[in-house]
Amino acid sequence: MIGKHVRMKSLMNPKTGRTVIVAMDHGQIIGPAQGLENPLDAFRRVVRGRPDAILTTRGMVERGWEALDSGVGLIIRITGGFTVLGGKFEEAMISSVAHSLKLGATGVAVTVKFGHERESEFTRQASLVADDCYTWGMPLMTEVWPAGKNVDKPSNLAAVKLGARAAAEYGTDIVKTFYPGTEEGCAEVVAGCPVPVVVLGGEKADAPIETFQMVEASIKAGAAGIAMGRNVWGQPDPTRMIEALRGIVHDGWSAEQADSFFGRKG
């Protein structure tokens, strides 16, 4: 387990115990989104902002590895297997822990859609990945995504609480999930989950201040950080966006301070 502890240091800031993760794994689902067209350039813009880690795919790494930095953790997504064209947002194994190690990964990520009609299959799949992660000393992130007939929306508080705890029970090291709408609700999720919880960004916000307000509330609620994609690389200046988010997560900035910093030039 020493290897896992060492790799976790590359994902979680040792001074604050929190993390700013930039999710760049969208291309395999939605195609060449603006901001991700060129893997090398996309990584360069993000790495300049000094996030704690990047969540991405093996294809992005294979074509943009020169821009990666040993000071930025690397999480490889190993489940997926669908696109928006297919319409069935399910999860299958598309890579392995062993292959991720060959790419220099310091973590792997899976998604479990709790409440889905194939929930038991997705959960079993993730649990077996947790076994492999234990063998290889690799941290596991689980994206908890509530879905299905019993879930009205993926940010449903009761569903997020249950999914986060269930993921921790089968051995995940970090839970990535939805902000459940309020600081109080987020605090409930954190209190019920014995592993770090990071909040995802979801759809692109209308204005950066909305993202900053959600991040500030999440940190106040006890979340261990964020794992955001289009609200970072979808910005005209993703480098500065990351710096603003780091201010909230690691330096105790308010949403207003982050927004003021982000809006300034230079």
Image: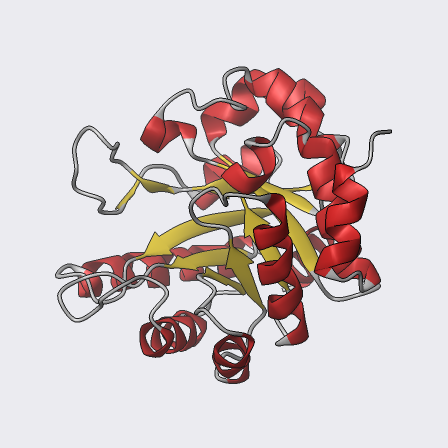
Question: Which quadrant of the view contains residue 248?
Answer: bottom right
Snapshot quadrant of residue 161: bottom left
- Vertically, is 131 above or below 241? below
Q: Is residue 77 above or below residue 132?
A: above
Residue 171, located in which quarter of the rendered image? bottom left
Depth check, front residue: 214 or 87: 214
What residue appears at the point 33 percent right and 32 percent down from the top-left corner?
Answer: 29
Colouring of the image: secondary structure
Q: Is residue 72 visible?
A: no
Q: How many marks?
A: 0
181 sits to left or right of 41:
left
Locate the C terminus and report the quarter of the image it occupies. Answer: top right
Residue 113 horizontal side relative to residue 182, left or right:
left
Is 227 on the left-hand or right-hand side of 251? left
- Between 98 and 235, the one lying in front of the other is 235
Image location (x, y in percent) of residue 95: 38, 37
Question: Percent x, y for residue 97?
Answer: 46, 45
x and y percentages locating residue 7 in the rendered image: 68, 53
Q: Residue at x 64, y 54 (%)?
A: 212
The N terminus sits in image quarter: bottom right
Viewer-proximal residue, 85 or 133?
85
Horizontal and vertical percent position of residue 187: 55, 80
